[in-house]
Image: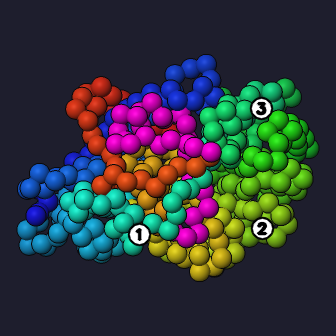
Amino acid sequence: MRITDVRTILVTTPWKGDPFWVPDKEYWRSAALIEVQTDEGATGLGEAIMGYFAGEVVPPIVDYYRRLLVDPDLRLDPTQPERCFDELYQRSLWWGRNGLGLSVLSGIEMALWDLAGKVAGKPVHAMLGGAVHQRLPLYASGGTGAWPVQKTVDQAKRYVDLGFKALKLGTGMMNRPGAYGTGIQPAPYGHWYAATAAQRVSDEYEKFKALRSAVGPEIEIATDSHAVQVRSHWTRRDAIAIAQAIEEFDLFFYEEPLRYDDPAGYAELRGLTRIPIAGGESLTGVGEFQDWLDRGALDIVQPDATHVGGIGPCLAVAKAAAARHANVIMHTGAAIGPGLMANLHVAFSSPNAHFVEYAVAPDNVRAEMLAEPVRVIDGFVKLPQEPGLGVALRPGFVEKYPFRAGIVEYA
């Protein structure tokens, strides 16, 4: 068997699964699906997170790797994804060790695992050495969750009603009275609307006090500052003050309290709060994660197979975390199908996988791609059984959701 083509499939879809994701308006996001085709008709489907952030950049990079994969002189076997990845990674070491190149390569590597599993008639977790869990808990990922307190409580209650035993909502407060800005443009997503540090702390205290009272002690609550996107008025002291203020509500974890150019700040914060500190969705490559773990920056590591390099590197990150006594919670927030399943398969293969993120918002799109739906039963999802990743590109899907340039997530 040999690879005959690798193509990028850009789509733009509405996310209708969560009325709290961005209320009162339609929310559309793009995705980059990557399909590997072979001379025997077998195909594999992957997903690169860069479709969500900047879909237009994906096809040229895929095309570079495509020329290598179809080169008969390289004799790359599509049923050996690790061998293929090693060769492609080696041939892009100058510019693809981390960042954009490796991020896009994630989708190709993922598609190769999907293909290999389908050819073997086995789910990907069986190809990774076998599952170590029969079921895993999911947490509902609610986006910013930066609404007035009662609306935030209503959002949390909806996730509990859907069967989740854990949920995550953002810090911040949208359109908060008393806010000020200094920019010449409207404040972008990620701007914190409180005017003073004291107001920020008060906002979070009141929010999480209400959330804990509403859902009780049996539901795990996490928070995310999305600090990779914070534009202004945000320091280590802010993160420390908020963490210490909401400790009494026994949070599951505090995600992205600081930007990703400040691992020392993460390590400092870890020593000043009992809330576990989580992060990693923006990191690429095993080496970046190893560096952060060596610095003592994270209690919980959050790799994403659509960004870190693919399924193999994602599993390697989980093992590196285990060696440093850290848990893993897979990030899946931007994935519409293959990316979600890839992270699930890695989690089921990782003894230290603690939870898996589940954004409810793109459920309507996932329903058209997954061979078996993700069913939340008592807060858990069962071990996938379909060959490969358990995804398919069904007839008419691409035509139904034509790509719209410029639909991007930005920081």
Q: Based on the displayed image, in which of its 4 quarters is residue 131 positioned?
A: bottom left
Residue bearing the label numbered 1: 130
For discs 2 and 3, the disc positioned in front in the rendered view: 3
Residue interval drawn in magenta? 350-378
Q: Is any atom of residue 285 visible in this view?
A: no
At x 38%, y 48%, the residue is 338
The three-letter amino acid code for the residue at tag 3 is Val
Numbered badge on residue 44:
none
Q: Is residue 356 magenta?
A: yes
Q: Residue drawn 59% across and 80% down?
A: 323
> Residue 306, how many percent across, how many down?
42, 55
- Left or right? Give the position of 384 relative to 171: left
Q: Answer with left or right where residue 174 lies relative to residue 42.
A: right
Total labels: the figure holds 3
Which quadrant does the C terminus fall into?
A: top right
The crowd level at tag 2 (other Cα within 10 Å; few <14, some 14-19, many 20+) is many
The disc, 3 or 1, on the residue closer to the chain's N-terminal end is 1
Q: Residues within 10 Å of mark 1 (few under 14, many from 20)?
A: some
Residue for badge 2: 270
